[in-house]
Image (cartoon, grey):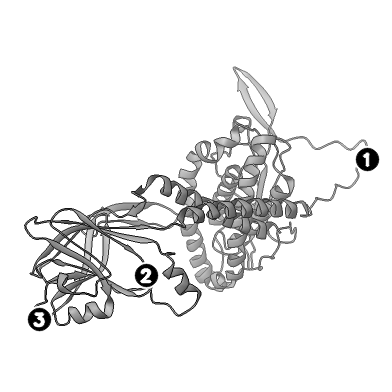
């Protein structure tokens, strides 16, 4: 229910964003009721410039009925001749008639065009015939001849059509600026319909996700065995702070996320080479789980903002997603720490060598939720970005008019690769690399938990290497 509800809510968000964008475009991007492209320079040394065939021919039935009743709207072609002394002709005609008229006539056919930068791709159709003036032909369904800026307007009809641009006297050398516009009467109702559908799906998906989250049974750790009344309680972890010459012990507070990973010492030499294949079922499931994770976090954002509490069911679900991700990562290429296949479960599994838990916060800051996931976590993003994706470089290529970028592998990936190669040839996983990899993963998951609004405790800037976590010191208390 949580996953399906989150997917429905995500679809609703997409429709809502699309409908809102369409409505904004309707209000701001029309010229005289038309959506228009910018001006595009069209020039050819041949007799004509033509479009690709626009096939609106449909079988008898509902679609033909829609086309014939203006469902495709009205088209407007604006032209501005480059030479005022040479009038230009713009016409729309049936493709078959246009083909017969321009048979064996040298012309350029537009294959593609871009507005920024202004670029048109043509296909040259050679020929030796000289065409008659286009205004003498009777098959045009819409046409205009002008030596100043003008436009052609056409109510779209069913058929197979071609747009033709020529000099009015059918001479060589066509040169003009053109723009294309379209107006559809159903655009505004469609935008409002998208927004309405998005709101309904978002609300329904949210309700379904919350209802499903309440049914998630939270795994409760068994209580410790009863101790005699005289048994001393274990002391809280201590850290030491100095004030002048005095030394005062201060109880430290553990970070709410605890990540552990215990290295198997009988790892297969070569199994890691195919773990990417074996883990594919988990990757597929995790794609949908992480979509649900994001949507659940958005819902939790508003819950925390107005109530100061993270909905318990959503919290347990998100912890389960992190736990599942860490088990798969520990098995595969975040650590290669075990050959035991990860369980398909969100719940804790004490028998598995990798585990992740997050302590549920009874209260969270209403105001901190607005900035901690982007502003306060930004320094950590810059650091852990090197762990995960590594350095990247980007540059502009003027010859191709586009950005090009190159990325280097992250530190975790490099270390795990070194460990895998060592395991392949020497049969053992270097303990030092393993402890460093666990520390890097621990840093990453702490930041993820903080950015996912699961705690107000600021992640420490440190590597806690080894199997188990260390307590957070007094200087790393919540912001």
Badge 3 marks a residue whose secondary structure is: loop
On the image, the x and y values in percent for residue 213 come to 73, 52
385 lies above or below 64? above
Which residue: 61% across, 23% down?
242
**Viewer-proximal residue, 142 or 315?**
142
Quadrant (top left, top right, bottom left, bottom right) of the C terminus: top right
**Viewer-proximal residue, 478 or 30?**
30
**Dot placed on the residue nearer the N-terminal end, 3 or 2:** 3
The residue identified by callout 1 is 228
Badge 1 marks a residue whose secondary structure is: loop
The residue identified by callout 3 is 129
Q: Which label was assigned to residue 379? A: none
**Viewer-proximal residue, 308 or 323?**
308
Please tell me whether mark 3 or mark 2 is closer to you in this view: 2
Q: Are marks 3 and 2 in contact (CB under 8 Å)?
A: no
Left/right placement of residue 312 relative to residue 469 reads right
**Dot placed on the residue nearer the N-terminal end, 3 or 1:** 3
The residue identified by callout 2 is 157
Q: Residue furthest left?
A: 85
**Dot placed on the residue nearer the N-terminal end, 2 or 1:** 2
On the image, the x and y values in percent for residue 301 come to 62, 42
- Quarter of the figure with residue 286: bottom right
Label 2 crowd bin: few (<14), some (14–19), many (20+), radius 10 Å: many
Counting the numbered discs, the total is 3
Please tell me whether mark 3 or mark 1 is closer to you in this view: 3
- Quarter of the figure with residue 10: bottom right
Q: CA distance from mark 3 to mark 1?
A: 109 Å
The answer to whether residue 435 of the structure is visible from this angle is no
Label 3 crowd bin: few (<14), some (14–19), many (20+), radius 10 Å: few
On the image, the x and y values in percent for residue 408 come to 39, 57
Badge 2 marks a residue whose secondary structure is: loop
Which residue: 61% across, 70% down?
281
């Amino acid at each position: 229910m949580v996953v399906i509800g989150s997917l429905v809510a995500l679809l609703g968000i997409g429709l809502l964003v699309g409908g809102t964008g369409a409505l904004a475009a309707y209000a701001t991007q029309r010229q005289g009721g038309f959506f228009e492209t910018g001006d595009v320079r069209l020039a050819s040394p041949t007799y004509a410039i033509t479009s690709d065939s626009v096939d609106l021919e449909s079988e008898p039935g509902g679609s033909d009925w829609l086309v014939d009743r203006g469902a495709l709207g009205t088209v407007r072609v604006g032209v501005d001749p480059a030479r005022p002394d040479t009038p230009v002709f713009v016409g729309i005609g049936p493709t078959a008639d246009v083909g017969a008229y321009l048979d064996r006539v040298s012309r350029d056919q537009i294959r593609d065009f871009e507005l920024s930068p202004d670029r048109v791709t043509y296909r040259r159709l050679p020929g030796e015939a000289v065409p008659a003036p286009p205004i003498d032909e009777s098959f045009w369904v819409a046409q205009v001849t002008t030596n100043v800026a003008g436009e052609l307007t056409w109510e779209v009809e069913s058929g197979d059509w071609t747009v033709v641009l020529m000099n009015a006297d059918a001479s060589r050398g066509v040169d003009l600026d053109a723009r294309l516009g379209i107006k559809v009467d159903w655009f505004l109702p469609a935008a409002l319909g998208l927004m309405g559908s998005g709101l309904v799906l978002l609300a329904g998906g949210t309700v379904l996700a919350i209802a499903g989250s309440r049914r998630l049974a939270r795994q409760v750790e068994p209580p410790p065995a009863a101790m005699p009344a005289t048994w001393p309680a274990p002391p809280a972890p201590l850290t030491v702070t100095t004030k002048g010459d005095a030394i005062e012990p201060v109880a430290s507070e553990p970070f709410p996320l605890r990540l552990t990973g215990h290295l198997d010492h009988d790892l297969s030499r070569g199994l890691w080479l195919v773990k990417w294949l074996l883990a594919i079922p988990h990757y597929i499931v995790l794609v949908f789980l992480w979509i649900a994770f994001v949507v659940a976090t958005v819902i939790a954002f508003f819950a925390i903002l107005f109530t100061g509490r993270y909905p318990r069911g959503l919290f347990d679900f998100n912890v389960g997603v992190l736990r599942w991700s860490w088990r798969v990562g520990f098995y595969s290429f975040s650590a290669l720490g075990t050959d035991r296949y990860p369980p398909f479960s969100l719940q804790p599994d004490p028998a598995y060598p990798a585990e992740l838990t997050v302590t549920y916060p009874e209260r969270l800051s209403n105001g901190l939720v607005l900035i901690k996931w982007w502003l306060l976590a930004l320094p950590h993003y810059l650091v852990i970005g090197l762990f995960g994706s590594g350095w990247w470089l980007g540059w502009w290529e003027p010859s191709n008019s586009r950005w090009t970028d190159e990325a280097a592998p992250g530190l975790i990936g490099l270390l795990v690769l070194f460990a895998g190669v060592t395991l392949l040839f020497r049969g053992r996983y270097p303990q030092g690399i393993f402890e460093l990899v666990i520390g890097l993963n621990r840093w990453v998951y702490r930041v993820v938990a903080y950015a996912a609004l699961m705690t107000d405790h600021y992640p420490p800037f440190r590597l806690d290497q080894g199997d188990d976590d260390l307590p957070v010191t007094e200087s790393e208390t919540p912001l």
